[in-house]
Amino acid sequence: MKIFIFTKDFPKKNFIGGAEIQAYLLAKYLTLKNHQIKYLVLKGKKGLAQTEIEGFKLFSLSSQQESDLKAIINFYQINKKEKPDLFFIRDFRYLFIFYLTCRFLKIPVIYNTTHINNCLPYPKKIKFSINILATLISAKAALIHFLNFKTLKKVHVITINRLHAEILKTKYNITATPIYNSMEDNYQKFKVAEKEDIIVWVANLKGRKRPEIFLQLAQELKETNFKFLMIGYLQNNIDLYKKLIEETQNFNPNFKYLGGQAVEKVDEILAKAKIFVNTCLPEGFGNNFIQAWLNECPTITLDFDPDDIIKNNKIGFHSASYEQLAKDTKFLITNENTRAEMGKHAREFALKNHLPKNNVLKYENYFLSIINKKQHD
């Protein structure tokens, strides 16, 4: 198969996004199965530039100085020239515009959800204000989102979890195929003889990830002498989070902010840790969940348990309130046997459901079914 894969950016040292990592793993493992893969990103240092990574081609549609329109024009030209068997996109913002191009060229489009908002036509209301420009910007964002959502009816859809597929089918009669996210297993590489008294939080620091809740937890439980480690790049509310982190570090010697880290470094830290805490609002399927599970870290999540996996497989707790989150954390701190047993359950589940070499087969079969159907139409 010849496949084009698109996300706006490519995962790199100073930018690690969940959807981008998943697209990268898909490109890598499809390449290992001898498929021709070209990974497209919107902008690069040089427009129409191509480099090779892990055996596949990384291609920038335009330079940083050029407009999005230029990137879209180049997208049309490269698709017309190379005629891929299908186009896979994991960036909701560009679904509608790239679908129009692919429809004209008769190239099948597959979209992979990344967030619960992908499954809703109006996730945010238009913000009306006396500032006309701000109102127009808000209205434009709502319109683009709606157009992207309506496009789901016209493309092939893969969802990040079963809940997304259920929402799309029951509410909007959109058929979708769930395929869970994958992460590479580095546990044996970093495994230690005995885990340390460490609790870890991993995400890019922004509003919907709610890092301030973990800071509060670290402060409340500082007398346990467990180390509380926070990992992630600052993405928004930067001044606020810098201030909160600095205050917590000043008053709590057991808390440390490690900044953004590469995927393997996160695995190295999780391999030593005993507990993983998640405070994010419901989204899709965090890569950090899978990393924690592969590294035998039971998960305590505040509001988000994808497909009730944590609850049903006894690999941690879905706390649902901050008070319960603190109680659940204390419980695992003081009940080592239960914590270790949950960690083993977590790894067993991840090995069964989240290895790239297994999930890429699901993508491959799905892609081939679309291509075969097109050939027989």
Image (spheres, rainbow, N blue to C red):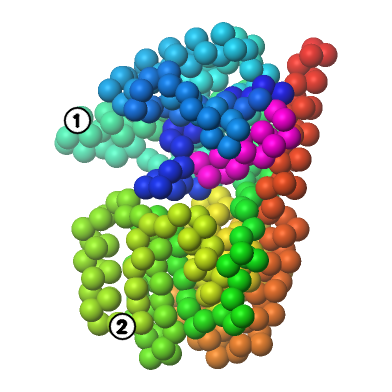
- Across and down, in percent, residue 61 comes to 43, 21
What secondary structure is found at the residue carrying circle 2?
Answer: loop
Real-space CA distance between mark 1 and mark 2, rounded to the nearest whole angstrom: 48 Å
Image point (31%, 34%), residue name: 138
- Pick whichever of labels 1 and 2 is earlier in the sequence: 1
The residue singled out by tag 2 in the image is 253
Which dot, 1 or 2, sits closer to the camera? 2
- Across and down, in percent, residue 365 comes to 78, 34
Image point (27%, 28%), residue name: 136
The residue singled out by tag 1 in the image is 132
Residue 32 part of the magenta segment: yes
* Count of marks placed on residues: 2
- Across and down, in percent, residue 7 comes to 49, 33
Image point (26%, 55%), residue name: 237
Residues at marks 1 and 2 touching, judged by CB atoms closer than 8 Å? no
**Kind of residue at badge 1:** Ile
Image point (55%, 50%), residue name: 284
Q: Residue furthest left?
A: 130
- In the image: residue 223, left or right of residue 244: right
What secondary structure is found at the residue carrying circle 1?
Answer: helix
Residue 4, placed above or below residue 21: above
- In the image: residue 249, left or right of residue 372: left
Camera-side residue of 49 and 97: 49
Please tell me in which quadrant of the rendered image residue 23 appears: top right
Crowding near the residue tagged with mark 2, few <14, some 14–19, many ≥20 C-alpha atoms within 10 Å = few
- In the image: residue 157, left or right of residue 334: right
- Across and down, in percent, residue 161 comes to 64, 49
The residue range painted magenta reads 19-35
**Kind of residue at badge 2:** Pro
Q: Main secondary structure of the magenta part?
A: helix
Res 262 seen here: yes
Image quadrant holding the N terminus, namely: top right
